[in-house]
Image: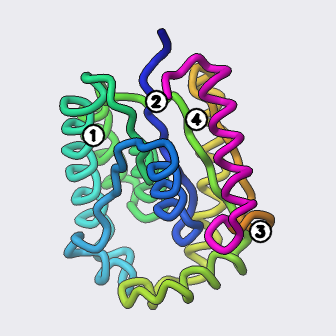
Amino acid sequence: MGATPFITVEGPIGVGKTSLAKAISDHFQFTLLKEIVDENPFLGKFYENIEEWSFQTEMFFLCNRYKQLTDIHNHYLKKDVPVVADYHIFKNLIFAGRSLNRVEYEKYLKIYDILTADMPKPNVVIYLHASLETILSRIKLRGRDIEKNISPLYLEQLSIDYDKAINEFEAQHPEVTVLRFNGDDLDFVKHQEDLQFIINTLSNTLIKGSIQS
């Protein structure tokens, strides 16, 4: 008998993580875990002044994601209930590394290591990436007020950080399958055939990896 599916969808802001995670949840009837974003009271201030509000913003996300993953582990994964999440907690280090100063980051990393030491790990990570042009157009399309002040330069740097982080994650965790999809080539929201391609690729991965679905 294979492992219970725990799938995470990752990628830069606006690339379509939540939309894809929901589509996967609907197709496979997996439990959906969505990250807390709009509830973060510091996020709007962060986009206006990154240096001033970065530590508060990142600590809020870390503590809430820790609580979410603990609940998922206790209430679903331990009971062999499959889960798909629209984030992986390693993203915290990507954002923290981009926005915190050296002293803040060192403090943050110690807390991160303690909280994530016994966190459940996914067996499949889906990595969505796209050009800055595509990301900006999708952010504009979804029209969130809280994102209207995001700097294109910040998004571009973030995409570079994500590419580096996913390469390092894949090298450090060979037991986890990483599936990569280019958002410039695939629009799974508008085109059903693109979504079906991703679903089929994931389905084959679950079968080959002897992961229960």
- The answer to which of marks 4 and 1 sits earlier in the sequence is 1
Helix, strand or loop for disc 3: loop
Q: Where's residue 164, x and y in %?
A: 65, 47
Instruction: Kindly identify the residue that appears in the image at 36 percent across and 51 percent down.
Output: 105
Mark 3 is on which residue type?
Asp
Contact between labelled residues 3 and 1, with CB atoms less than 8 Å apart: no
Mark 1 is on which residue type?
Leu
Q: Which residue is mark 1?
A: 69
**Mark in the foreground, 2 or 1:** 2
Instruction: Kindly identify the residue that appears in the image at 49 percent across and 84 percent down.
Output: 142
Q: Name the foreground residue: 62 vs 110.
A: 62
Q: Which residue is mark 2?
A: 5
- The answer to which of marks 4 and 2 sits earlier in the sequence is 2
**Mark in the foreground, 2 or 3:** 2
- The answer to which of marks 2 and 1 sits earlier in the sequence is 2
Residue 151 in the image: above or below residue 3: below
- The answer to which of marks 4 and 3 sits earlier in the sequence is 4
Q: Which residues are magenta?
A: 188-213
Q: Which residue is mark 4?
A: 169
Q: Which residue is mark 3?
A: 184
Instruction: Kindly identify the residue that appears in the image at 24 percent across and 35 percent down.
Output: 115
